[in-house]
Image (cartoon, rainbow, N blue to C red):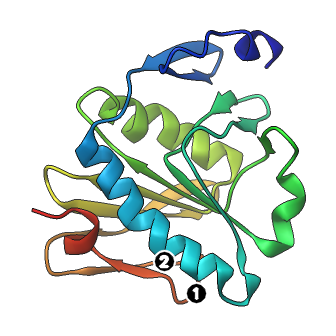
Amino acid sequence: YDDYCRLPDDGIRYEVLDGVLYKTPVCTPMHQECVGNILVPLVFYGNKRRRGAVYGARIDVILPGLATPVEPDILFIVKERLHIVKEKFILGAPDFIAEVISPITWRRDRHKKFEIYAKAGVREYWIVNPPARTIELFFLRENRYELIGKYGVGETVRSEVLPGFEVKVDEVCPA
């Protein structure tokens, strides 16, 4: 992690997955719009009755032995597990992660991060595909992700891990 901290602050997003450094250029407006369309309702959800904490990209998540660090687009930590939030990073698996895929990151988000998040114990993982206007919801069961559903236009995604949290695909991925 110390070597990672010495990387330049040049607008590039750096992640280390299984010891391999990955670089991702700055996000597109469509990507950021989709992130915001999940992040905002998730912040309201988290603030209601202090259910937990929400973070967006540009926060380091250290998954010991797997990723040091990874930067999910969106993550949520339930209040009972807020002890994993440290001063400069998060140490351990969030309860919920959403990644908005792009032509550059789709393979990494769908395969490498998918495996790492499952091994680390991330209980729920959403893969958001803006051009296809779909959200795939995966739930961790016996250390493996199970596809709960692939949701499209006109459908609502309901979290398995965050009771009462839901979003409409049309509102996350506008036309």
> Mark 2 packing: few (<14 Cα in 10 Å), some, or many (20+)?
some
The front one of 142 and 29 is: 29
Residue 147 visible, this angle: no
Could you say which quadrant of the image residue 8 lies in?
top right
- Mark 2 residue type: Ser
- Mark 1 residue type: Pro
x, y percent for residue 131 = 14, 49
x, y percent for residue 160 = 52, 78
User: With respect to residue 41, does 96 lie above or below?
Assistant: above
Helix, strand or loop under label 1: loop
Quadrant location of the C terminus?
A: bottom left
User: With respect to residue 105, does 149 lie above or below?
Assistant: below
Instruction: Name the residue that disc number 2 marks.
Output: 159
- Report the side of 76 relative to 68 (left or right): left
x, y percent for residue 96 = 59, 62
Residue 142 visible, this angle: yes
Could you say which quadrant of the image residue 154 lies in?
bottom left
Q: Measuring 85% from the left and 53% from the top, which residue is drawn there?
A: 84
The answer to whether mark 2 and mark 1 are in CB contact below 8 A is: yes
Instruction: Name the residue that disc number 1 marks.
Output: 163
Give the farthest residue toward the left: 175
The front one of 145 and 29 is: 29
* Count of numbered badges drawn on the protein: 2
Helix, strand or loop under label 2: loop
